[in-house]
Image (tube, grey):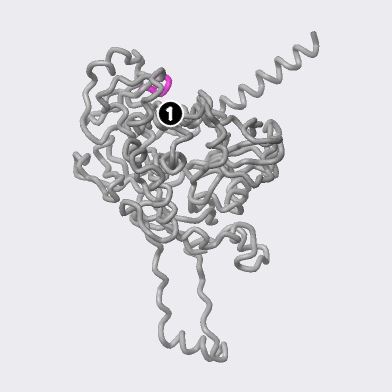
Amino acid sequence: MKTHLVALCLTTLLSAVDADMEGAVTDLGYDSYSTAWRYLGSYIDDCSTSSKWYSSCTSGTRKLLWAAYYDPNYEGEQIGEYQYYTSDGEWDDSTCTGDRCAKMDCHDPYTEDSSWELLGVYKESVSFDNDNFFEQLFKHQGYCLWDGDKEDNDYGSQDSDAWQDSNYWFMQTMRKELPEGCTQTSGFSGTYYIAMKPQEGGDMTLGVYTDSSCSTEADYTYEDYQSYATSLTATASSGAFDTWNAGMDAYKICQPCRAYNREATECSGEHCDRRRRLGEEEDGQGDEEQNGFNCYDDAGYQNCNQCYKFETHTDMEEADASDLSLADSQGTILLIEYDDVWYGSGLVGDVEEPEEEEEPEDEHEEREAEAMGSSMGSAGAYGGHYAGSAGGSDAGNGAGTSHSNAYGAVVGYSFAGVAALLALGGALVVARRGARQGGTLDGDIYVAAPR
């Protein structure tokens, strides 16, 4: 009896701790349309950063990071106050309805013109099951951003072939096929495990491992696993993770916390038939967007607050400098400045590196004289300092610098149609890999930031 009571009390306490994240972003007194977020990528947790006594950590757990922002200059025009970066590599201002038409550019860590201010960085377990980050994102904001609400076909989760010609259903189908944590697979001769493998630029793939914590990679690759896993559908398609990562590129770009549409949308037909009758702020539900840019999502919500869903339906925790430093050392997250320290590498959208200021000629000559003719060193930091550059570490050898300029590639916020991908077979795989080696993808730029 005592054991049961102790367990019950501990469970209740931990539930209360988790519930504390509710309102971390959405209950700060800001209008929900003045808040935004972006996806930073994932990393492998070695449990060295678990400072909270109630945190449970298993070494090798995959975590993801996202950041929340606030616009103090917001004037009340909701979606109509902003222009949005699109998959065409352009800023779309067709949504602007008032005098202010600001860029939703919280993904740009450099610009001094942006009004977005960082609210915090948050971490969650990488889980593809229901009531976790990806499931919550896909069925709410993803449904409208990937145009699932605009498809003529009457798709449902029971339609096994829907993924072949629907961006939205491709992502949902693949999500359901991905493994939870480090999972043993019978696909190979011998004992092997599969797990999500973080990659540079915020991308991911599946890795094949020899141990139950998925820390030691095997000689097999994800493509080998595809050949053995006969039950896969979308995940077995050619270039599956290229399509997945292209879909997730949309969220590396600054997005409103409120789900939205970039064209006026009325509630009609199936959307209204299954719409949940909730009031504003009930489980993330929103009122109608005043300019008509409404998102009626796959879960029956109207203009759902995505940040609220992360707070209440996932294992979201507040991240700190140690989490960012660990992710930075693995070279898998996008560039972000946090407490005057730079973490990660790589830029998205049309963001460009700031140009270094030229040194005045007299100072240049004086420095050359002092250095006895040696050339000037370049200071690769832009404001603050980079993680790993303090504490006496040599540049390029400290934590967070080992992957400097390793990802000088091009990625973007673009999502190739699934039908086109299937028609092209493996061409997208080659194209996207080629793009990462210096080309461009639909005009969207992803470059390694100076370290």
Residue at 64% x, 37% y is: 61
Query: Taking the image as drawn, is residue 158 in sight?
Result: yes
Residue 111 horizontal/vertical position (percent): 37, 57
In magenta stretch: residue 123: no
Would residue 447 be found to the left or right of residue 205 on screen? left
Q: Is residue 349 above or below residue 95?
A: below
Q: Is residue 378 above or below residue 445?
A: below
Task: Report crowding for label 1: few under 14, some 14 to 19, many 20 or more residues within 10 A (C-alpha).
Answer: many
Q: Which quadrant is the N terminus positioned in?
A: top right
Frontmost residue, 378 versus 132: 132
Residue 7 horizontal/vertical position (percent): 73, 17
Frontmost residue, 253 versus 188: 188
Q: Which residue is mark 1?
A: 172
Would residue 353 be found to the left or right of residue 389 on screen? left
Q: Is residue 158 above or below residue 304?
A: above
Give the total number of marks visible in the rendering. 1
Magenta region: 281-285
Toward the right, the furthest residue is 2
Residue at 56% x, 40% y is: 206
Which three-letter amino acid code belongs to the residue tagged 1? Gln
Residue 343, image quadrant = bottom right
Residue at 36% x, 22% y is: 298
Give the SS element for disc 1: helix
Residue 67 horizontal/vertical position (percent): 47, 42
Frontmost residue, 30 versus 423: 423
